[in-house]
Each structure stands twice: as structure tokens, then as C-alpha cells.
Image (tube, helix red, strand yellow):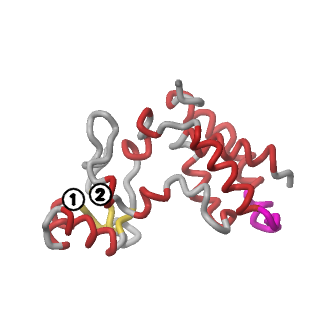
Amino acid sequence: MMLKPNLNELGKLAKDKHIENKKYFDKLKKKPPRDLDYVMQEIHDNEFKKTDCLKCANCCKTTGPLFTFADIERISKSFRQKPQQFIDQYLRIDEDKDYVLKSVPCTFLDAENYCMIYDVRPKACREFPHTDRKKFQQISNLTLRNVGICPAAYNIVEEMKKRIKL
């Protein structure tokens, strides 16, 4: 099944919707509906029933996750490395003082879009695109960015605007 929207059009679509989405999220932050988390979970689950991330992996190809120290310890242990060895080999500290990959696409993404560290992957990867997070309205800036990266996030926000009238 083809991704909808496809990656070639996703950037433009996200850009075209950005102002509308930003206004929507500003309203959502001011007065989130009581059932927001429930509705978002349902929209998220429905979207991911029909989305195959292996066909895309745009998140792994274009952005790098933030690595917590718990992530670093878990992954380095799976490599039988000391955390500092893992850090030296794969990570750098960004402008926000967070550990991130030295480069993208992700070092751990293989040619078939499989994650070579899937079972121990960072929390940020496990939770991406964060559209089922509790108190969803609090991460609107992150969601606005992810709409331009992830076709599923784009669809989830479009469905959300139809279902939750503000």
C-alpha cells in the first residue's frame, strides 16, 4: 500500500497547513477537551493499523533521536560496551546539551528500513511520533514539526481537526 501522503508531497502539504495547524494547536492549548487523550489514542491507533513504518522510515532518515542516559546504558550494554565508548563512537552533544547521533540517517537503520537496535532503541524512537502521548496539547511544537516528517502524524492531525472542533 502506498503511503498517503507520499514523502515527496509531505513537506509542501505540511508547510501549506502550518499556519492553520498552529492556530488550531494554540486554541487546543488554551482549552483542551476533557476527552482529548482518549480521542487522540483512538485516532493514533486507527492510523497505525494502516501505516507500515518500514515503507517509510523518514524519521530515521532525516532526524535523530535524543538519547537519555538510560538509553545509552541500555544500548551500550547490548553492544557489550561501556556507556562512554558508545557515546564516543556514535553520539555528540547538541546545542541543547542533549546527546544525539553524530549524523543522520540513523547509523542503526539498515537498507530495508529495519532498526538494528529495535529491541533496545531510544525512548524517543519508541514513542515517535508522540501522537498518543498523555496531555497531547503540551507538545504542539513537536507535533507541528513531526507533521512534516511523518505521513502518519500528518494524517493524525488532519483527522484530529475533523473530530475535535474548536
The extreme right residue here reads 166
The answer to which quarter of the image holds residue 71 is: bottom left
The numbered mark at residue 29 is: none
Q: CA distance from mark 1 to mark 2?
A: 6 Å
Residue drawn 69% across the image and 52% down it: 42
Q: Is residue 153 left or right of residue 104?
A: right
Across and down, in percent, residue 104 comes to: 31, 47
**Where the C terminus falls, by quadrant?**
bottom right
The answer to which quarter of the image holds residue 79 is: bottom left
The numbered mark at residue 101 is: 2
Q: Is residue 159 left or right of residue 145?
A: right
Q: Is residue 23 above or below residue 31?
A: above
Would you say the residues marked 1 and 2 are in contact, meaning their CB atoms lie under 8 Å apart?
yes
- Between 98 and 134, the residue placed more toward the observer is 134
Asked if the magenta segment contains residue 64, the reply would be no
Across and down, in percent, residue 56 comes to: 44, 35
Residue drawn 66% across the image and 56% down it: 41
Three-letter residue code for mark 2: Leu
Across and down, in percent, residue 40 comes to: 69, 55
Circle 1 packing at 10 Å, graded few (<14), some (14-19), many (20+), is some
Q: Which of pointers 1 and 2 lies earlier in the amino acid sequence?
A: 1
Callout 2: SS: strand
Callout 1: SS: helix
Residue drawn 67% across the image and 68% down it: 135
Residue drawn 82% across the image and 52% down it: 164
Circle 2 packing at 10 Å, graded few (<14), some (14-19), many (20+), is many
Q: Is residue 26 left or right of residue 63?
A: right
Residue underneath mark 1: 90
- Between 145 and 65, the residue placed more toward the observer is 65
Across and down, in percent, residue 145 comes to: 56, 51
Three-letter residue code for mark 1: Tyr
- The span picked out in magenta is 25-35
